[in-house]
Image: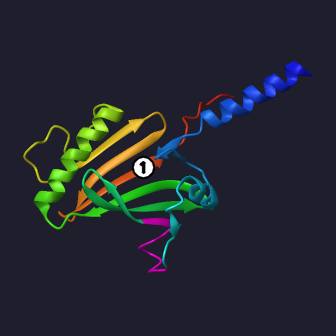
Amino acid sequence: MKKFLLCLTWLLSTAGASAQALWQDVPVGATPAEVQALMPQAQPAPAGPPSSKEGVQLEIPAHELLGARFKVSFVFQADRLQRITLLANTGSAREARALGQRLTTSLRSSYGLEMSTKSRGSTSSATIDRQWTFRRTSVHLQVVDETFVQLEYSGLAPARSNRL
């Protein structure tokens, strides 16, 4: 009986440890209640046009990150967290590029060099479009419409083998 309980404890602890975290240790597949338990500042998203907020159930209106204020949106599908999007309006293309560069430096220290994207290695272009893949998490950094900086964390589906 003692061995059984020890084995059960080990299985439960490894199942929780392998949960795929997206941002701030919030795991992909979490329910809205689980996200709110981990992020008490996340509140139900206000109603808006359905096309602009598809799947967004929770939001943090203002989150400070690297000197900028981001709106954080938690996107769910069938009540399971699929991605987290952070969006900042910097007000100018110059500020958006500077914030994008600061985020790139921070993300490189966490995830290493980014994958090949439109702006990898570019230092003079106003465009920032970079993507990292770490374990089963994708991180995508973009400057959108010249003044908006968007950072998106999403889970990647595990690789499937074609075993018969």
Q: Nearer the viewer, residue 94 or 80?
A: 94
Q: Quadrant of residue 49?
A: bottom left
Which region is colored magenta?
47-60
- Asked if residue 104 is positioned above or below residue 135 in the image, the reply reads below
Res. 56 in view: no
Residue 148 rendering spot, x and y as whole percentages: 24, 63
Residue at 41% x, 43% y is 138
Q: Residue furthest left?
A: 124
From the viewer's perspective, tell me whether residue 67 is left or right of residue 58.
left
Residue 78 rendering spot, x and y as whole percentages: 62, 62
Residue at 49% x, 60% y is 74
Q: Residue furthest top?
A: 3
Residue at 13% x, 65% y is 92
Q: Nearer the viewer, residue 160 or 81?
A: 81
- Residue 85 among magenta residues: no
Residue 19 rendering spot, x and y as whole percentages: 59, 39
In the picture of the structure, the residue carrying the numbered disc 1 is 153
SS class of the residue under badge 1?
A: strand
Res. 9 in view: yes
Residue 161 rendering spot, x and y as whole percentages: 59, 30
Q: Quadrant of the N terminus?
A: top right
Q: Quadrant of the C terminus?
A: top right
From the viewer's perspective, tell me whether residue 82 is left or right of residue 108.
right
- Residue 55 among magenta residues: yes
Q: Residue furthest right?
A: 1
The amino acid on which the numbered mark 1 sits, given as a three-letter code, is Tyr
- Asked if residue 63 is positioned above or below residue 118 in the image, the reply reads below
Residue at 13% x, 42% y is 122
Q: Quadrant of residue 146?
A: bottom left
Q: Residues within 10 Å of mark 1 (few under 14, many from 20)?
A: many
Q: Most prominent secondary structure in the magenta stretch?
A: loop
